[in-house]
Image (cartoon, helix red, strand yellow):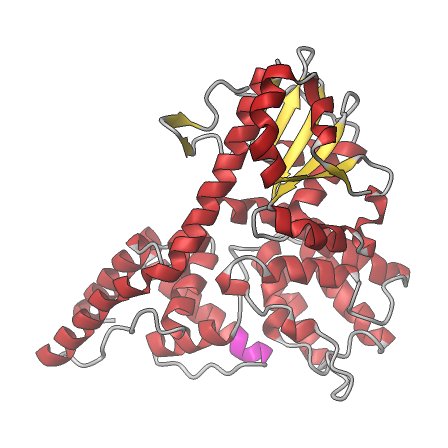
Amino acid sequence: MDGSAETLIRELLQRWRNDPASTYRSWFLWEERLKNFRSIRRGVQQVATEIKAGSFGVTYRGSSLETVVHSIAEQRQLFKGADHAFLWKPKLRIPDIYEDERNQRAFGHMLDACVCCDTAEHVLAEIHRIDAIKIKGLGPAVANILYFLHPTIAPPFNTAIVRGFNALTGANVKLGRWDSYLAMREGMLAFNCSFRDLLSNDLGAVAGFCFDLGNGLYAPPPRSEERTVREAWEADLAKVRLALAPQRLSEEESRTHTEVQGWLRDLGLALGYRVWIAQNDRGRAYGSSRLGDGCLSSLPKIDGHAVADAVPLIDVIWLNDGGGIVAAFEVEHTTSIYSGVVRMLDLALGGGAGSLHGLYLVAPDKREGDVRAQLARPAFSSIGDLNVRYLPYGALSEHRAAIAKFGDGVRALEKISHRLT
């Protein structure tokens, strides 16, 4: 790459990083993204375990795989449609991992091996192994699962990413083939190495850049050095500001999530509880201060690795003076409830909730039906005996001041919430 081309790419990357409409700002730096890795990893392990035990079944709908892939598909725009490749298409009999037991077990083996391994060599070996089997309809869309297991090894893969990568590099990567995916991966690694200071070890950043190019948010740098061509390209870059309107909704969504966390923080403090804010949300601006102000800076020691890893990421926790967890809240504005429920399950079933009174999913009023439908999935069968409740935004907004003034602890929330299990 000559100096002129590198300069143009650096200019484009700088604009991309600073643009609120880019996937870098709206997804890669999105705090909720980081919370989803562990829960998706756990879900993938459950799929592998069920396949190994012969209890996975022969359908996609209602399976543990649907739960995991649906959660991935809701990770904002980059993964929209990620579930399409796994939907059972009976006329084509693809992907052939539901009715063919050998293929299903091979797929489960790949997932299990990739959950357990930690090197690029092992991940690539599993990709080559599954490719050699030639399972009909099962292609590199699986990389969208692998990304959440190994974000520094396996980049995501979809039409827009491929289109953007080809436009950026002049390559001719095709969809649907593992060898094309691996060729794209090598190209991404080389590009990422050249511009590491503007990207990340996490390959989601470079994939997001290609995604935005592939969707036409930006035009790739011109290969011609003619002045008029470069001036036209720079004029096109200036127009990307017109694309900010769709992103404003996402920014509003993030603000609302923080606002509701703030309501729960203030209510917990008013009721005399000690309050914990998720460790990667504590520094968010809230009013004229930070969301974590006045809250615990550390949690009491909790036994069990799963619990210790999950609990610090729960949106809001109320604790008594003895350090016991009284209530846990997950705010689910628009994203899948999967990650939040997994963290609550780890808390309730992992031995860290001896004084726990309730688990609350806090969401917009209109989402109750969606929440109930999600909890009805077989993947959440173990939640049936727990006191999980739905706390709608409207009721919390209307009654939080009165509860703070007259409420008798966390039990007051039972009057404005609905039992889900």
Q: Residue furthest left?
A: 227
Locate residue 221: give its quadrant.
bottom left
The residue sitting at 44% across, 42% down in the picture is 255
Dominant secondary-structure state across the stretch colored magenta = helix
- Of residue 119 and residue 365, the one placed in the foreground of this image is 365
Start-end of magenta stretch: 177-181
Q: Is residue 353 left or right of residue 338?
A: right
Q: Residue furthest top?
A: 321
Locate residue 148: give its quadrant.
bottom right
Total labels: the figure holds 0
Residue 93 in picture, x, y percent from top left? 77, 85
> Which quadrant of the figure contains the N terminus?
bottom left
The residue sitting at 69% across, 55% down in the picture is 370
Residue 207 in sight from this viewpoint: yes
Q: Residue furthest bottom?
A: 91
- Of residue 247 and residue 343, the one placed in the foreground of this image is 247
Residue 328 in picture, x, y percent from top left? 67, 31
Residue 244 in picture, x, y percent from top left? 33, 60
Residue 127 in picture, x, y percent from top left? 64, 70
